[in-house]
Amino acid sequence: MLGADTAARARPDGYTLLLINSSLNMNAALGQKLPFDVSGAFEPVAVAARAPMILIAKPSPDLRSVKDLVELARARKGELVYGTAGIGTPAHFAGEMFCKAANVRAIHVPYKGAAESITDQLAGRIDFQFANAAVAMPHIKAGKVIALATTGSTRLPLLPDVPTMAEAGYAGVWSTNGWATWLPPERRVRSSIGSRPPSAMRLRIRACVRRSRPAAW
């Protein structure tokens, strides 16, 4: 949150732009104490990217699908462990939504980052996790973990044979790590620069972001 705090404290001249993932909103929603008021410090401009999570587990003859994972979790009754990059992250939300939807219990272990979480999974210390593609794909390709499902509305082009959580029977488990652009609220900008509000600037940024996104959006 250091970058967000810096942007929140910056002079609201209409030229300071913040690009941050969905943890900004999630931390605020969870009541985490932040050095600034999210609703008062920023206004959204455009969503720049969306990154569905991948449900991964250790390869096993008895664990090849989401159904297998649910059956294992029910059999072991709260003993399975899942890791995340921290409390309030998209992976944490996905993990809790999955446990609730499947009516199972699992132990949540929050790490300081995704690298530590995947390292412990490769070492066999955790059973499953929802990971982003950048972290998970090298290990999926190497056969060290297996992809059971993805959390987006459609299948990932990188994993065309892996079903979505909805296709696996859990439509309510939908979580993405979204990246959005933010600017200081227009009222602060107007009072700061004493001229016309930067509405045109916002529209231009929004248009540029939309042109850069895939047509499917």
Image (cartoon, helix red, strand yellow):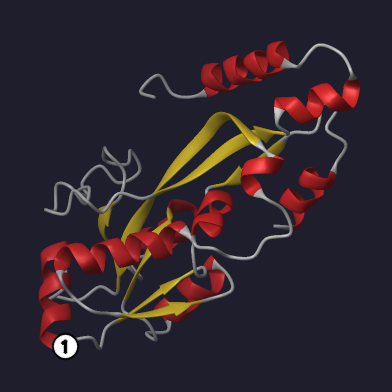
For residue 7, above or below residue 56: above
Looking at the rendering, in which quadrant would you find the C terminus?
Answer: top left
Disc 1 residue type (three-letter): Arg
Q: In which quadrant is the N terminus drawn?
A: bottom right
- Is residue 2 or residue 63 the one in the foreground? 2
Name the image quarter holding residue 173: bottom left
Local packing at callout 1 (Cα closer than 10 Å; few below 14, some 14-19, many 20+) is few
In the shown orientation, is residue 200 left or right of residue 142? Answer: right
In the depicted structure, whether residue 31 falls above or below residue 22: below
> Residue at image x 85%, y 41%?
10
Residue linked to disc 1 = 76
How many badges with numbers are in the image? Answer: 1
Horizontal placement of 2 versus 121: left or right? Answer: right
**204 with respect to 67 (left or right):** right
Q: Residue at x 72, y 53 (%)?
A: 36
Q: Which residue is more in the foreground, 112 or 172? A: 172
| Above or below: residue 2 compared with residue 185 | below
Say which residue appears at 44% left-offset and 57% top-offset: 90
Residue 58: % across, % down: 29, 74
Residue at x 58% of width, y 23% of height = 209
Dot 1 falls on a residue whose secondary structure is: helix
Q: Is residue 77 above or below residue 188?
A: below
Quarter of the rendering containing residue 131: bottom left
Residue 195 falls left or right of residue 139: right
Q: Pinpoint residue 157: horizontal percent, then vertical percent.
A: 33, 38
User: Where residue 161 sits: x, y (%)?
Assistant: 20, 46
Q: Is residue 146 visible?
A: no
Using the rendered image of the protein, determine whether residue 45 is visible from the camera's viewpoint.
yes
